[in-house]
């Protein structure tokens, strides 16, 4: 209602006062977006980039924008340039036009324009920030509002346009883009016009790439990659099959044929995200799509879910797009919720209800339990801050809430609502409230009230239980003292011992508080529970431990017991992850009952034949926490001779991660480890990654200090996953005392990290910086920073609170 009122007031103000009343600010304000949406339609962009072989040379470009104006008003284009001469010439309707730069915008006076059709031609130097340039590779990544850093445009999601693209390329390069390729010569490639797309989905990739074609039932997909390993390249057939299966599933579910002219993908080494759903040119990270020689079921499932997620975006995000980035979560919730449904037929032997709980609840709780919790739908006044909307809440809490909505409506009613939604808003934009209106018309449930609590308020309930006359009574507490009540009805049981076992079906969301008797009984019997009850209880025990209701030492002993007995791989992996994070979080001497307890168990599982995927999972966990001399030497020996256990399939990436950890444990072997591992790495891009990260492991403080100083400069943070890995090793838990000095300088450049980095970079920067710290000195630094930075952008402050919660707000005591 607040948003609707704001829209009406803004429109009324514009009508009564004229465009002169519009106050320009940096970024893309909601006021500007509303004004432009009311006046602009029929957008087309014809773009032409000349890409030189030298990655440090400017990219000379030209473009033609076609548009219709309702009223003859000034045109305000978005262009946050980084060039001395960003615009060389600008003509409007065939005549040279005057223009001005004002707060990251190009303003074209109305006297050059007319009501109806207009054409704007611009010669410009392409902006560099969102052009990811390497010696022989370039790709765009423009989400959420970074198109304006590349070319002049109307950078808001509800002004969709059709894009034509031409590229002049260095010799030996090929390219892929949103549209179909029309022609290609040795130096120039031309792409056809696209369907209507928002600016953040415009994309091209160019460079020294290989192309692998797959087809099924007359449908063709080209997979562009830079891989040289034949075993990895062979996985393109599996990748293609999973894309085809996802497309077929979605077409059947939605009743809408794939709505774009083609579906090609590019697999990028060092890509910032798992994937990005550019229609016709979807980008993926090589880390997820190309697995090791013998991938675990979890790795295969994660790849399939990622492919399904990005494919779902073709309908939810690309075909129907959120109107404003406060609703970006709507495309993410659909993609994640549908991904689980799509992969189920591909993996019939997996318990997908268990997978849903394991995939979404723990990461959602990781942020929702903190003082930095945020609503699923957040307030957003300017798209310059849209990247800060992203996080675990929208990716992981939202699917949990969506599943509740589906259960309220019934699956067929929900499906009918989705079909109506897609039909009504095809190639257009919609809000969450638009969807709720459609679903409300199909049910007698009060969805608006339900949505207000679950979607528009932050936090999770804290739920306690009492038992009287064999009847369980629950009560909720709002941790932010607003008096909210979260509507839900999870299953709970009374055990034979008379204790409450809460949320046994895993459908409830919150902290289900355990008294000492309940937690003791659950920990004693958990291995005998059915799988869903087992994973739900495990997650809840972890949350209770962090909240101070379960002693860490007792909890960790239970995790060791689970790992000894557990045969369900998803639960085993979750328990192993909880074990490593808990050992890192607490004083190992106090929590394990003696040095090496957890390490000894993990080594036993890793080294014993017949354990299947549990062996490699245990080895990876051990690699993270091996810190006593015996365990570290064992891991080092296995890293040096990975063939000593035939049952253990250790991939190249496993060996690289282990090399990093061993360099920290054995400073005297730093050069030996570097030389051996560098010789093992087969791909050019992976070798470059190793050489970038490895200095952060140096035994020399001076070297580490110089690495950190380099990371503070934007030009050294070009490949963000490498950057955050390097920062993480500088702040590794084995070097806590030495690295506290890095915390404040890294926090102080957060606004720059936000401005120059991609959407997940602030969160990932903070996680890498703070995850290994637990000491009071670190807590003091963070608290002092937060107290002093009173002007820190609120969502950025929330990210700090989320990633430092284990330092400044931990209730559990060893």
Image: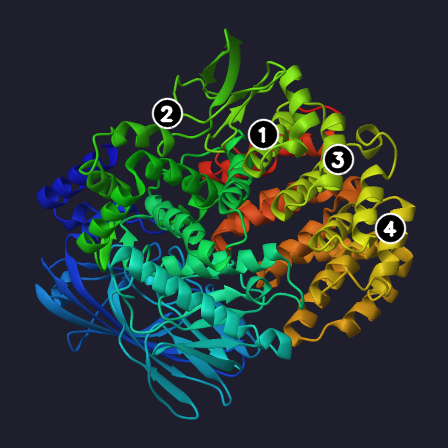
> Of the residues tagged 4 and 1, which is closer to the observer?
1
Q: Is residue 640 above or below residue 190?
A: above
Say left or right for 298 vs 336: right
The disc, 1 or 2, on the residue closer to the chain's N-terminal end is 2
Disc 4: CA contacts within 10 A as few (<14), some (14-19) or many (>=20): many
* Nearest to N terminus: mark 4 or mark 1: 1
Q: Earlier in the sequence, mark 4 or mark 2?
A: 2
Q: Secondary structure at mark 4?
A: helix
Mark 2: few, some, or many residues within 10 Å (few <14, many ≥20)?
Answer: few
Q: Which residue is mark 1?
A: 540
CB within 8 Å, label 4 to label 2: no
Mark 4 sits on what residue?
Answer: 632
Q: Give me the C-alpha separation between circle 1 and circle 2.
A: 19 Å
Please give the residue where the numbered disc 3 appears in the rendered image.
561
Q: Which residue is labeled 2 in the image?
A: 487
Relative to 459, 606 lies left or right: right
């Amino acid at each position: 209602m607040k948003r609707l009122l704001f829209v009406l007031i803004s429109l009324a103000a514009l009508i009564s006062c004229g465009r002169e009343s519009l106050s320009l600010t940096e970024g893309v304000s909601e006021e500007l977006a509303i004004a432009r949406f009311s006046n602009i339609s029929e957008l087309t962009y014809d773009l032409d980039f000349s890409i030189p072989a030298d990655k440090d040379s400017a990219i000379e470009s030209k473009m033609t924008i076609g548009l219709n104006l309702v009223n003859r008003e000034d045109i305000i284009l978005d262009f946050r340039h980084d060039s001395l001469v960003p615009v060389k010439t600008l003509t409007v309707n065939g005549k040279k036009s005057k223009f001005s730069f004002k707060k990251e915008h190009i303003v074209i006076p109305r006297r050059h324009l007319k009501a109806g059709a207009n054409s704007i031609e611009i010669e410009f130097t392409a902006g560099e920030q969102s052009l990811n340039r390497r010696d022989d590779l370039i790709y765009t990544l423009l989400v959420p509002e970074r198109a304006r850093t590349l070319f002049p445009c109307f950078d808001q999601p509800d002004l969709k346009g059709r894009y034509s693209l031409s590229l002049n390329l260095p010799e030996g390069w090929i390219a892929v883009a949103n549209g179909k390729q029309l022609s290609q010569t040795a130096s120039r490639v031309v792409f056809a016009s696209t369907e209507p797309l928002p600016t953040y989905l415009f994309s091209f990739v160019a460079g020294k790439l290989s192309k692998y074609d797959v087809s099924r039932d007359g449908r063709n997909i080209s997979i562009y990659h830079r891989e040289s390993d034949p075993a990895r390249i062979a996985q393109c057939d599996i990748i293609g099959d999973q894309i085809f299966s996802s497309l077929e599933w979605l077409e059947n579910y939605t009743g809408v044929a794939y709505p774009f002219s083609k579906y090609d993908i590019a697999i990028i080494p060092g890509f910032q995200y798992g994937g990005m759903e550019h229609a016709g040119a979807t980008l993926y990270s090589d880390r997820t799509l190309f697995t090791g020689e013998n991938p675990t079921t979890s790795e295969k499932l994660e790849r399939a879910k990622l492919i399904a997620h990005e494919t779902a975006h073709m309908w939810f995000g690309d075909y129907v797009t959120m109107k404003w980035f406060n609703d970006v979560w709507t495309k993410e919730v659909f993609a994640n919720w549908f991904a689980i449904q799509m992969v189920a037929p591909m993996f019939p032997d997996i318990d997908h209800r268990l997978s849903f709980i394991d995939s979404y609840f723990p990461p959602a709780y990781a942020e929702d339990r903190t003082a930095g919790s945020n609503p699923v739908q957040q307030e957003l006044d300017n798209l310059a801050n849209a990247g800060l909307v992203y996080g675990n809440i929208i990716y992981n809490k939202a699917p949990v809430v969506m599943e509740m909505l589906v259960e309220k409506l019934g699956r067929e009613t929900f499906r009918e609502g989705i079909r109506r939604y897609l039909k009504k808003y095809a190639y257009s934009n919609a809000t969450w409230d638009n969807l709720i209106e459609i679903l409300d018309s199909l049910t007698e449930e009060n969805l608006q009230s339900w949505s207000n609590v679950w979607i528009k308020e932050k936090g999770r309930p804290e739920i306690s239980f009492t038992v009287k006359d064999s009847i369980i009574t629950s009560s909720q507490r709002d941790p932010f003292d607003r008096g909210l009540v979260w509507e839900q009805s999870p299953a709970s049981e009374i055990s034979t011992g008379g204790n409450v076992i809460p949320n046994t079906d895993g459908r409830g969301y919150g902290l289900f508080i355990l008294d000492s008797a309940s937690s003791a009984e659950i920990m004693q019997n958990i291995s005998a529970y059915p799988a869903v009850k087992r994973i739900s209880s495990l997650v809840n025990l972890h949350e209770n431990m962090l909240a101070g209701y379960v002693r860490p030492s007792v909890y960790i002993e239970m995790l060791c017991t689970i790992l000894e007995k557990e045969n369900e791989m998803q639960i085993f992996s979750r328990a192993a992850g909880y074990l490593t994070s808990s050992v890192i979080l607490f004083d190992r001497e106090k929590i394990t009952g003696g040095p090496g307890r957890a390490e000894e168990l993990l080594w036993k599982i890793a080294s014993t034949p017949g354990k299947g995927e549990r062996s490699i999972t245990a080895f990876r966990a051990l690699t993270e926490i091996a810190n006593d001399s015996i365990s570290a030497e064992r891991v080092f020996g296995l890293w040096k001779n990975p063939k000593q256990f035939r049952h253990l399939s250790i991939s190249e990436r496993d060996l690289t991660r282990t090399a990093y950890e061993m360099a920290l444990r054995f400073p005297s072997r730093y050069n030996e480890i570097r030389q051996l591992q560098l010789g093992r790495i087969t791909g050019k891009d992976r070798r470059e990654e190793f050489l970038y990260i490895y200095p952060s492991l140096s035994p020399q403080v001076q070297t580490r200090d110089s690495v950190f100083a380099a990371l503070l400069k934007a030009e050294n943070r070009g490949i963000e996953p490498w950057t955050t890995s390097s920062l993480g090793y500088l702040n590794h838990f084995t070097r806590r005392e030495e690295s506290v000095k890095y915390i404040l300088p890294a926090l102080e450049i957060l606004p720059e990290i936000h401005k120059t980095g991609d959407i997940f970079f602030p969160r990932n920067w903070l996680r890498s910086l703070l995850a290994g710290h637990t000491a009071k000195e670190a807590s003091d630094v963070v608290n002092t920073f937060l107290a002093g930075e009173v002007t820190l952008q609120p969502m950025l402050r929330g990210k700090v609170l989320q990633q430092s919660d284990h330092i400044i707000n931990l209730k559990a005591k060893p």
